Amino acid sequence: MRGLSARDNSYGNSGTTGGIRAAGTTATAVLAALGLLTAGCSTGGTGMRDEGAARTDQSTPSSAPTPPSGSSSIKKIDPVQLLKSDPKVSDQVKDDLKPCVADAYPVDTSYGNLTGSGQPDVVVNVLTCGDAVGIGTYVYRVTEKKYENVFAVEEPAVYSAIDRGDLVVTKQVYDKGDPVAYPSGEDVITYRWVGNRFSEHDRVHNEFSKALGDGGIDGPAPSSPPEN
């Protein structure tokens, strides 16, 4: 018990009979107190409890947690091979689809339910190696045990994501002279699967501040302080 650590033994060194009797009486009282406290701990009710045991008891669940359903049943694909074998993917994108480092391709892949086919749909985004700008986005649906391309956009600065069953496509908008890192705005388009195709459900256009530019506020450079 943490509250009953070893105490000072000076009462046992008095050398007198009275001191020995007092020590014996004190020891008996301590043993009795220990017995009561031990009984309180074993009941698990209102008695004292060691802190370590309390944390262990409280943190141990009655049963092991259940992993998310379907998380281990997703069949991973080779997105690069899928794109290269897809006739709907342009030759330009296929030519640009090269490893950035070693065998690492600039491809992002997401799995989720978009079309209700009973199998996870696959969203593949192709990016550039240098600045990670999306140049193509595709959705594949399992039909007759094969992956079918049911959505594709090939243009600079496009990217798709799965959001609670919706396909959300973001397109960067550039005005003349905009650097790649600082578009003038973006269109965020939400698609939903209706019948046998994706239908636009919502569209949001965001305008970005021109004050940021290349990271600072546009304006004349500050002049140097006059020399004394």
Image (cartoon, helix red, strand yellow):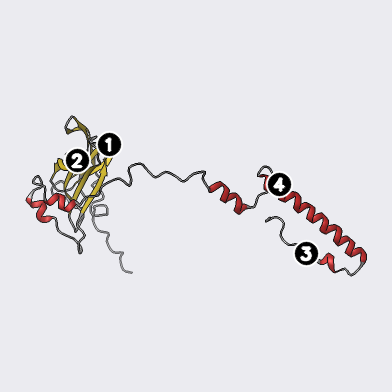
Residue where numbered disc 1 is placed: 165
Residue where numbered disc 3 is placed: 8
For the residue marked with disc 2, what is the amino acid? Val
Residue where numbered disc 2 is placed: 142
Q: Which mark is residue 40?
A: 4
Pinpoint residue 115: horizontal percent, then vertical percent.
22, 35
Asked if the residues shown at circle 3 and circle 2 are in contact, with their CB atoms under 8 angstroms apart, the answer is no
Nearest to N terminus: mark 4 or mark 2:
4
**In the rendered image of this protein, does residue 179 appear above or below residue 18?**
above
Task: Identify the secondary structure beneath mark 2.
Answer: strand
Task: Identify the secondary structure beneath mark 1.
Answer: loop
Q: Is residue 146 left or right of residue 111?
A: left
Residue most extreme to the right = 17
State the CA–CA distance, disc 2 to disc 1.
16 Å
Q: Residue at x 68, y 43 (%)?
A: 46
The quadrant of the rendering that contains the C terminus is bottom left
Q: Nearer the viewer, mark 3 or mark 2?
A: 2
Nearest to N terminus: mark 2 or mark 1:
2
Asked if the residues shown at circle 1 and circle 4 are in contact, with their CB atoms under 8 angstroms apart, the answer is no
Nearest to N terminus: mark 3 or mark 2:
3
Pinpoint residue 39: horizontal percent, then vertical percent.
72, 48
